[in-house]
Amino acid sequence: MESIANIKRQYIVDLAAEGKRADGRNFDQYRDIKIIPNYLMKAEGSAYVEIGDTKVIVGVKYDVGTPFPDIPNQGVMTTSAEFAPMASPDFEAGPPGEDAIELARVVDRGIRESNAIDTDKLCIIPGEKVMIVFVDIQILDQDGNLIDACGIAAITALLTAKMRVYDEEGNPTEEFVPLPVNKTPVPCTMAKIGKSILLDPQMDEEMVLDSRITVTTDEGGNVVAMQKGMAGSFKLEEIMEAVAISKREGQKNREKIQKAISESE
Amino acid sequence: MEVGVLKRADGSSYVEWGNNKVFASVYGPKEVIPRFLARNDKAILRCKYNMTPFSVEDRKRPGPDRRSIEIGKVTSGALEPAILVEDYPNSMIEIAIEIMQADAGTRCAGITAATLALVDAGIPMRDLVAACAAGKSNDEIVLDLCKEEDNSGQADVPIAIMPRSDDVTLLQMDGILTEDEVEEALKLAMSGCKKIYEMQKKALKVKYGG
């Protein structure tokens, strides 16, 4: 497993106690974010996202399938993440591990719980045929804060995705419409190092962190998902601080997503 | 709540929480298998959360699914801060949580049970970990949603705390809440955790006296 020298660990911890970070950022500052919507041609929706040196691609594909029995007139969304071996010495080929599953589920939860996708409109024939939306996350370069990179990429890909129109008998037509997405949930992840809360932890910071928290907000300023990760603990005030930071910085990232999409059209 | 219900496990417990029925067991500290997972500065925690096929309405396919794996991971994250893991380098503590009957709130019941099993196994700890959820149902913030409330509810916030220091060790949330509602739900859930904490202490005293 990837490890970090004790001297470097101590350096990052000491810096955090002084209110500083190794790369000179403020505690509530993201690295540079680059968003490229419609990055791929074959996927119905896609996005390439960089946060600093972290690089991820998300593709959206569809299938037609049967709905869940308890929600016969709603489409289905599923999210999965692939930690490709090229992205980190820690990643190995094979079925997704704990971390990949947690990542996919945290990203999924933000989109699902905010009701970003109007799943009623994904219904083709109630109880028989619905659209299944696959959100597939591919990690290219893991330099910390995969959750936010993937969360931004996933919602960007969904916002730009096209959906084939089906007629009343459930046969495909040649017409395409945008996927019914009406919200932009954005996750913000913070690391707790000592007593400090650091937004957008870079890889070295991730390796020394005591605990991690992700708060996903929508444009209404509502909190739609939270997840504490790794060991360690938070005080109530620290959680509320994280919520406030997420509301503020999430809105900035949301504007970046909207700008990137409007520029690509 | 009952402590020491299984003979072979180093520590075990049984928790009935409404209609939830949960067993937890602890083995260790013991040798780390596979070897490469060992850490020379602390014990590692391996936590398995499992739902039996007969625990829910429609039979659940046996074996781990993505939900179980995620819950296992956040559970070990919730318990580790309370355990003096640094006293047991190069070893591992195995925790198993088995849900016999599920009725919403099983991860909280599981963490509560696992804590009792850890104490029963004689693992040195800073504090107990008590878990409880708060949620929003019918536009009101309420404690510990039941199955019907959970399915129709507007939000669910399961947390775990170390009650002596009020450190939050598990935090998840799904649904839609405003900032103020998040705070209200967290405070309510924390008060729920404190009640669970008292019950945990009582259950431990039944077995260990004092």
Image: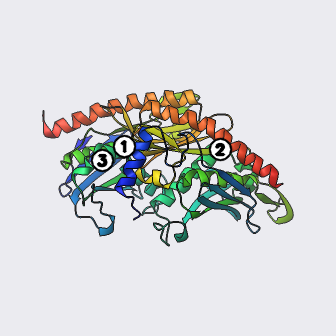
Label 2 sits on residue = A185
Identity, as a three-letter code, of the amino acid under mark 2: Pro
Which residue appears at 55% of the width and 37% of the height? Answer: B155
Q: Quadrant of the N terminus of chain A?
A: bottom left
Residue A32 drawn at (x, y percent): 64, 50
Q: Which residue is under mark 1?
A: B109
Q: Marks 3 and 2: CB-CB under 8 Å?
A: no
Q: Position of residue A117 (x, y in %)?
A: 70, 48
**Residue under label 3:** B114
In the image, are marks 2 and 1 on the same chain?
no
The type of residue carrying mark 3 is Ala
Front position in the image: B47 or A199 = A199
Same chain for labels 3 and 1? Say yes or no.
yes
Q: Is residue B83 above or below residue A172?
A: above
Q: Dot 2, crowdedness within 10 Å: few (<14), some or many (≥20)?
A: many
> Element type at marker 3?
helix
Determine contact: label 2, label 1, CB under 8 Å.
no
- Spatial separation of the CA atoms under disc 2 and disc 1: 30 Å
Q: Nearer the viewer, residue A104 or B17?
A: A104
From the viewer's perspective, is A209 left or right of A104?
left
